[in-house]
Image (cartoon, grey):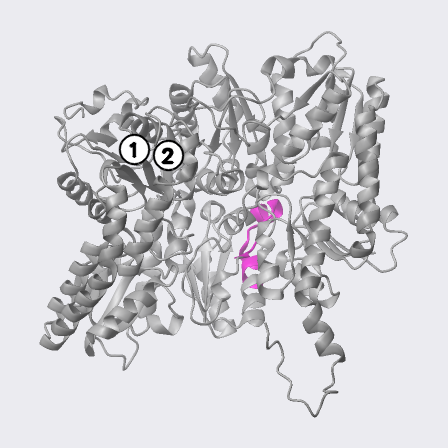
């Protein structure tokens, strides 16, 4: 392995400015990774927009009408594409749009928006209407707040503007826009208590893909811990108003929800801990951290019993997978830092080394953490693109790539396995059962018989 | 037949998408082309996400990443930097620039920026084709034709007359394009097929990694489309102002013959008639055999099809062809719908529907919520359209024959074959088999519920006891 190759010498980076966003662990400039900046025009970034960020955070709220104010595309592209599940209404899975035409853009879309809200409230009786602004709204200057306020009074239901014009930043700006909506919704009304439940916790950055919220809920119940509010997997609008009642916030998807947890600490003095249920090791650590934070001997005892029970259940199967997978190499390119960091440990549990790792919107501290966890020679990259990713995967002989839907073709085109670690999937990847699912998925893709017939491009032949 | 056009304040579960999406396919259909979407980052990412799932390819499309500053002061810097970076990484022969809601509304003069970029840099033979595709300007259907037209406007040069014909396809699948080529080769017709995304969007596994997948209509061919003997263009529903064939007619006097997508026996017959007439070629025996096989298949299935009541939705051109296929085979369309831009459908279908025993609702603007309502009211038993219609299956039990784009919940959307006599057989079989499957699934319960009135009163009856 080329442990001291500088990014400047890396042959896979074609755009000068991009060199600052790629580093090789063990190289000379290992501290200088650029992140949290605007994407470079023409770099074929894998990132999305503000609207996307806001939508993914709020979308799992099940009893809401999610209305996109803008041309139809933004709504069409996001129609029912995520695997978040509901224990009740499925209203959130519908895609609503004001479908602005050229005329609307010229004359303004306020009237159409008001009519759309009235129509949808009458038709669906939602508990809340979220109105997302898109690029065009930010430019033509519709007064979203005023329209929403009037519509709210007219219809006697909360109508909330989400300031998510696409060009106002990247996905992370959308997370903040969504968090601001959540903060507003949880503001204690008269008589609503703050921190009234000493053994109750909130779970942030959890979207109930494939029932993951329910999996964690089952663990917490066995530990004697009450789950107060989850943001936002399988949440209902009324739930949000109880958010301040919990004694502790646990935050999984830090990229989307750390901001909210920080604000709640500031405003309501509710502490938070950063956790992750991705992988066996992190799941065990997380359960212990929760028990520790609640400082109750009964909870601690129950937690240890749960961990022992669950580990006994999965260890033999995991060991089998580990035998088949040891020595393989993985590349990881995911949305946020928490997932990337957890995946390093989870792959180690399977005997797999990570050779390329990066995120769309990771933060400096997260990259520093990654750098401490990976081996020398590992390429770490921020806001990368298909050309770089393909180049490094070929050079470092990765056997598979972990990513979202857009990255799938990158792996398949060069004959590599692929793991969908996105929100469209239909199987759980967190907790103990998620770890088994993950190991199975890794084995399914790496050990597939199809590779016997397929020469890996830029690498040695499989098998 | 009735036409329903109402003012719609809200769209509920849209099945149309936006204009720039439609522009991707024509650009992918020319040699050595890379695409740059001038707008905020999300547009290109959403398009890539959708198309990656549909085509199972790595769709590499750049964005100019317009931010707040670019929106206020104009996107010139972003566009030029985007072109520069695309050129560095991909070294394409053509860069296709698609605008978006954002860049159109802030009024960027994209064509001028592109010309300046070419003048100020040593770009060799690089061509830049810019296309105005604001999301609110139309659906992907308009985006497809407008982009194809702009490509010709920019890349076609005056050329001496030659014997080739231009074959301009509508938004069909890569497998459909492959079939059109096979047919034309069988007929020994010399042709330029445009836009040809057969290999770029339905790739084969190659031994090397290509940043830009080989394939697409050759630029040298596009240059000479002006000298062709004739143009045959699939596109009855297309506005002449958007039509690539119309441009070749107006600018270079290449005779234009408009045909529907050759799906269904009448449309296929028309297609072959026009190709034979324009080229003087005979219809080969092989094609005749294929036609006779279709006739045989139509007889085989006609009684099953007679039970079909279809809800058809999608892009106007394919909706027209699919509706004709249904009518020819005794499947009663109950609703025929476009998301937007279906204004021409009503007139086009009026003559076709004269023999229909019942009214067909033709909707030029609609959404899946409309289709669900009408389907229930008019007892549709099959929907024909793209994957988003899974909503109709899930919520209303209406079986779906997947057709069009996107197909993201099944594999093989790019490989669906529906054109030509052979393709028509396949498409028809898919519809018939869906009807049969549905009948098989529901027949026993339905008959039981309809006719069994507890006649065997004295016997304890356990329904479905054997499963």
Expressed as whole percent of the image width and height from the top left, the position of residue A411 reads 39, 35
- The span shown in magenta is A96-115
Q: Is residue A278 visible?
A: no
Q: Give the residue drawn at x 15%, y 44%.
A: A369
**A61 displayed left or right of B356:** left
Please give the residue where the numbered disc 1 appears in the rendered image: A398
Expressed as whole percent of the image width and height from the top left, the position of residue A179 reads 31, 58
Chain ID of residue with mark 1: A
**B354 displayed left or right of B156:** right
Between the residue at mark 1 and the residue at mark 2, the CA separation in whole angstroms equals 8 Å
Query: In the figure, A89 relative to A84: above or below?
Result: below
Q: Give the residue drawn at x 42%, y 20%.
A: B87
Expressed as whole percent of the image width and height from the top left, the position of residue B103 reads 49, 36
**A84 displayed left or right of B271:** left
Secondary structure, mark 2, is loop
Q: Which one is in front, B222 or B197?
A: B197
Does B204 lie within the magenta span?
no
Q: Quadrant of the N terminus of chain B?
A: bottom right
Please give the residue where the numbered disc 2 appears in the rendered image: A416
CB under 8 Å between discs 1 and 2: yes
Residue B289: image quadrant is top right
Query: In the figure, A116 relative to B69: above or below?
Result: below
């Amino acid at each position: 392995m080329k442990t001291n190759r500088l990014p400047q010498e890396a042959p896979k980076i074609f755009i000068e400015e991009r060199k600052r966003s790629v580093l090789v662990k063990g190289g000379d400039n290992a501290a200088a990774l650029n992140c949290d900046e605007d994407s470079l025009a023409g770099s074929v970034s894998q990132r999305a927009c503000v609207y996307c960020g806001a939508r993914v955070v709020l979308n799992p709220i099940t009893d809401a009408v999610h209305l996109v104010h803008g041309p139809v595309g933004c709504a069409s592209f996001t129609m029912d594409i995520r695997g978040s599940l509901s224990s009740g209404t499925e209203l959130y899975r519908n895609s609503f749009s004001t479908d602005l035409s050229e005329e609307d853009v010229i004359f303004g879309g306020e009237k159409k928006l008001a009519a759309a809200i009235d129509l949808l409230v009458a038709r669906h009786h939602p508990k809340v209407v979220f109105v997302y602004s898109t690029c065009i709204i930010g430019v033509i200057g519709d007064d979203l707040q005023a329209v929403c306020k009037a519509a709210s009074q007219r219809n006697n239901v909360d109508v909330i503007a989400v300031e998510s014009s696409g060009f106002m930043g990247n996905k992370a700006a959308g997370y903040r826009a969504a968090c601001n909506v959540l903060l507003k919704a949880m503001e204690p009304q008269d008589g609503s208590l703050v921190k009234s439940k000493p053994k109750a916790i909130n779970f942030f950055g959890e979207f109930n893909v494939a029932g993951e919220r329910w999996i964690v809920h089952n663990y917490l119940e066995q530990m004697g811990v009450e789950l107060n509010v989850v943001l936002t997997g399988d949440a209902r609008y009324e739930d949000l108003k109880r958010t301040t009642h919990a004694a502790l916030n646990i935050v999984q998807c830090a990229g989307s929800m750390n901001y909210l947890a920080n604000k709640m600490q500031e405003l309501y003095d509710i502490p938070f801990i950063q956790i992750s249920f991705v992988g066996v090791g992190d799941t065990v650590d997380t359960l212990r951290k929760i028990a520790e934070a609640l400082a109750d001997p009964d909870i601690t005892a129950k937690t240890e019993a749960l961990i022992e029970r669950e580990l006994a259940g999965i260890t033999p199967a995991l060991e089998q997978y580990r035998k088949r997978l040891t020595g393989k190499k993985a590349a990881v390119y995911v949305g946020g830092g928490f997932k990337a960091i957890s995946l390093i440990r989870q792959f180690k549990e399977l005997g797999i080394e990570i050779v390329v790792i990066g995120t769309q919107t990771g933060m400096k501290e997260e990259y520093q953490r990654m750098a401490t966890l990976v081996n020398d020679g590992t390429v770490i990259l921020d806001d990368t693109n298909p050309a770089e990713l393909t180049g490094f995967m070929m050079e470092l002989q990765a056997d598979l790539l972990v990513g979202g839907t857009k990255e799938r073709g990158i792996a398949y085109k060069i004959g590599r396995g692929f793991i969908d670690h996105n929100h469209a999937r239909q199987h759980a990847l967190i907790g103990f059962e998620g770890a088994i699912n993950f190991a199975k998925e890794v084995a399914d893709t790496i050990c597939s018989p199809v590779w016997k017939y397929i020469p890996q491009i830029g690498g040695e032949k499989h098998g | 037949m009735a036409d329903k056009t109402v003012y719609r304040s809200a769209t509920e579960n849209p099945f149309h998408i936006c204009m720039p999406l439609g522009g991707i396919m024509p650009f992918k259909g020319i040699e050595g082309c890379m695409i740059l979407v001038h707008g905020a980052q999300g547009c290109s990412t959403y398009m890539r996400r959708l198309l990656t799932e549909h085509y199972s390819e790595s769709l590499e499309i750049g964005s100019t990443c317009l931010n707040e500053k670019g929106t206020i002061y104009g996107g010139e810097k972003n566009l030029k930097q985007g072109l520069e970076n695309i050129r560095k990484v991909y070294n394409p022969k053509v860069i296709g620039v698609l605008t978006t809601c954002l860049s159109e509304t802030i009024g960027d003069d994209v064509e001028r920026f592109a010309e300046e970029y070419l003048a100020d840099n040593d770009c060799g033979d690089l061509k830049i084709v810019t296309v105005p595709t604001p999301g609110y300007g139309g659906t992907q259907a308009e985006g497809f034709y407008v982009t194809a037209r702009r490509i010709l406007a920019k890349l076609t040069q005056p050329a001496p007359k030659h014997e080739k014909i231009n074959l301009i396809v509508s938004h069909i699948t890569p497998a459909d394009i492959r079939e059109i080529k096979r047919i034309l080769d069988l007929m020994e017709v010399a042709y330029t097929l445009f836009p040809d995304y057969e290999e770029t969007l339905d790739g084969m596994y190659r031994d090397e990694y290509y940043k830009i997948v080989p394939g697409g209509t050759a630029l040298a061919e596009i240059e000479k489309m002006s000298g062709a003997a004739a143009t045959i263009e699939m596109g009855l529903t297309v506005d002449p102002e958007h039509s690539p064939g119309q441009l070749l007619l107006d600018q270079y006097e290449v005779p234009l013959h408009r045909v529907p997508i050759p799906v269904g026996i009448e449309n296929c017959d028309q297609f072959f008639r026009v190709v034979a007439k324009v080229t003087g070629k005979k219809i080969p025996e092989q094609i005749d055999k294929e036609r006779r096989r279709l006739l045989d298949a139509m007889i085989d299935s006609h009684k099953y099809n007679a039970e079909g009541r279809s809800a058809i939705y999608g892009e106007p051109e394919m909706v027209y062809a699919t509706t004709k296929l249904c009518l020819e085979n005794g499947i009663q369309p109950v609703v025929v719908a476009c998301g937007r831009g279906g204004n021409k459908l009503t007139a086009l279908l009026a003559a076709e529907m004269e023999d229909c025993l019942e009214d067909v609702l033709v909707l030029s603007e609609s959404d899946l919520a409309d289709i669900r309502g009408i389907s229930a009211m008019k007892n549709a038993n099959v929907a024909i359209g793209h994957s988003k219609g899974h909503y109709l299956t899930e919520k209303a039990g209406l079986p779906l024959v997947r057709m069009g784009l996107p197909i993201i919940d099944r594999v093989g959307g790019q490989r669906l074959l529906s054109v030509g006599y052979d393709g028509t057989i396949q498409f028809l079989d898919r519809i018939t088999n869906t009807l049969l499957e549905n009948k098989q699934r529901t027949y026993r319960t339905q008959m039981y519920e309809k006719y069994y009135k507890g006649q065997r009163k004295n016997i304890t009856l356990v329904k479905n006891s054997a499963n």
